[in-house]
Image: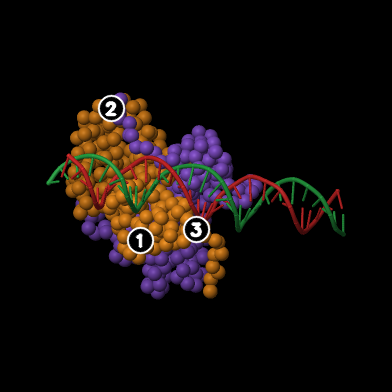
Chain colours: A purple, B orange, C red, D green
DNA sequence: GACCATAGTATGGTCTGACCATACTCGGAA
DNA sequence: TTCCGAGTATGGTCAGACCATACTATGGTC
């Protein structure tokens, strides 16, 4: 038999494990409620502090949301907000330089390319609608801040083409993380005509179902938006077709 | 002026914000230490419980690691383990069905394709070495469990070709999340000859610097490993070149 | 009977103070 | 010089209390 790790789990980790087990075994889904902190503490024979630390972890990971008060909506409710956790993750690791802005932007390009190349039929109409609406609002944007807000919505629509919620959540988190950088880039550029032309082109190509062409358009767009970011030139081998 | 959100932040969130500020402003990097819990509590005029909840969040996000005792290594030390946070995130959201296995596996294909297509010269030798070593160990694997362990190392090497730490961490988390699924797949298949042939092909193509061919090999490999997972056939538009 | 104000109560959020286990530090003994 | 034990700073946990919040039920008023 294999050796068992002898590490002593901390109390709150045991609580965490049991709550997770309950979630999966009982098939709890977003909207369902967890027992109150005091009740959990009593049933698990631990202190409320330990329960709270476990719940804090779940909240950090975007799995639950807590509200005080009484009634059906009080207490810990299951949710599904992975993007907040991802955004926190990226922001903090950028802060400790264990991640660089280039890597984040590279990842963004990867997702958008993939999304337009692998547009999922069932989700395409919805995504295109979001993209179209964002396009219209971008036209009327008065400030870089506003423009970027709708730009985020547009590119989130691009990610949604894939029909993959993990990619959509990651895109939300990415954009949240590089938000300040995006606004600064638009302010520096001064005008948004070229970016808007890119957007329209991406939109039309996606609507036409021409994945490869849309992927090229996305690549050019991001190269324009982040002039010196891509590290592609240093790559060995043959250029991308 | 814009309206300010009137939401009252919880105490531990304020603590969290101040610690984060200290990290970025002081330029702390992995290996550096944070003040002790009692000291933080006193300086911020909050209770130790609030400090602990903030630290728990940071630990969950893979930014710090805490150890008891005295000496240089005691207390909260900055680290960089985004993969553990990502793995927790994926596992829990899979548990609440706000994410599906297909989406996770799709994401894996996306990363590996991207990595071989955008291999970064500076990181290629190191990645190839990891892939080669994993290849050799896979040959000698006696059990599906062992095989999968080294398979994980191989595909982590693939992700490392990109030189993007975010992708490498995500790959680690992905594989950790689908580990049980992978083992079951290998056990079901009974033999690993085809998979090994794929691996060698991917390795050789990556070493030759032929990104597009390697991308095709990766796609075929994953299609073989997860027979009914990819949703690609349902995609509209033209096939990938 | 319909409506509204008030007391009741269950919830999360926070604090205080204590105790334990751990693991380094330092002083004294061999 | 070496080694052992007391001292001590650290995180981990607990118990009990209090507050703010927000629903619920009660009862009075029209």
Q: Nearer the viewer, residue B134 or A191?
A: B134
Residue B143's tag is 2
Residue B234 shown left or right of residue D8 in the figure = right
Q: Which mark sits nearer the N-terminus, 3 or 2?
A: 3
Residue A119 seen by the camera: no
Secondary structure, mark 3, is helix
First in sequence, mark 1 or 2: give its number: 1
Tell me the mark number nearer the camera, choosing from 1 and 2: 1
Q: Chain of mark 1?
A: B
The disc placed on residue B50 is none
Residues at marks 3 and 1 touching, judged by CB atoms closer than 8 Å? no
Q: Quadrant of residue A43?
A: top right
Q: Label 1 vs label 2: CA separation?
A: 45 Å
> What is the spatial separation of the Cα atoms under label 3 and label 1, in whole angstroms?
19 Å
Q: Which residue is more in the foreground, A54 or C17?
A: C17
Residue at 32 percent across and 56 percent down: it is: B33
Identify the chain of the residue marked 2, using the numbered disc in the image.
B
- Observer-side mark, 3 or 2, equals 3
The residue carrying mark 1 is B23
Same-chain status of marks 3 and 1: yes
Q: Residue at x 43, y 58 (%)?
A: B41
Q: Which residue is identified by label 3?
A: B11
As drawn, B143 above or below D2:
above
Percent across and percent down for residue A211 are 39, 51
Q: Horizontal and vertical percent for residue C13? A: 53, 54
């Amino acid at each position: 038999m294999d050796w068992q790790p002898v590490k002593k789990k901390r109390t709150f980790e045991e609580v965490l494990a049991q709550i997770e087990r309950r979630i999966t075994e009982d098939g709890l889904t977003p909207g369902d409620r967890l027992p109150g902190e005091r009740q959990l503490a009593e049933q698990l024979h631990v202190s409320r502090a330990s329960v709270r630390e476990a719940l804090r972890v779940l909240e950090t990971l975007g799995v639950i949301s807590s509200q005080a008060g009484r009634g059906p909506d009080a207490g810990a409710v299951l949710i599904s907000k992975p993007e907040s956790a991802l955004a926190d993750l990226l922001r903090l690791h950028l802060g400790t330089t264990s991640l660089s802005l280039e890597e984040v932007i590279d990842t963004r390009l990867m997702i958008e390319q993939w999304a337009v190349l692998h547009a999922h039929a069932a989700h395409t109409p919805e995504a295109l609608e979001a993209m179209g609406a964002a396009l219209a609002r971008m036209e009327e944007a008065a400030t870089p801040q506003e423009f970027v807000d709708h730009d985020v919505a547009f590119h989130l629509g691009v990610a949604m083409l894939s029909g993959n919620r993990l990619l959509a959540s990651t895109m939300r988190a990415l954009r949240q993380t590089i938000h300040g950088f995006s606004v600064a880039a638009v302010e520096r550029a001064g005008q948004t005509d070229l970016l808007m032309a890119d957007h329209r082109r991406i939109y039309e190509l996606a609507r036409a179902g021409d994945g490869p062409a849309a992927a090229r358009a996305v690549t050019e767009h991001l190269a324009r938006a982040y002039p010196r970011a891509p590290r592609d030139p240093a790559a060995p081998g043959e250029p991308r077709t």
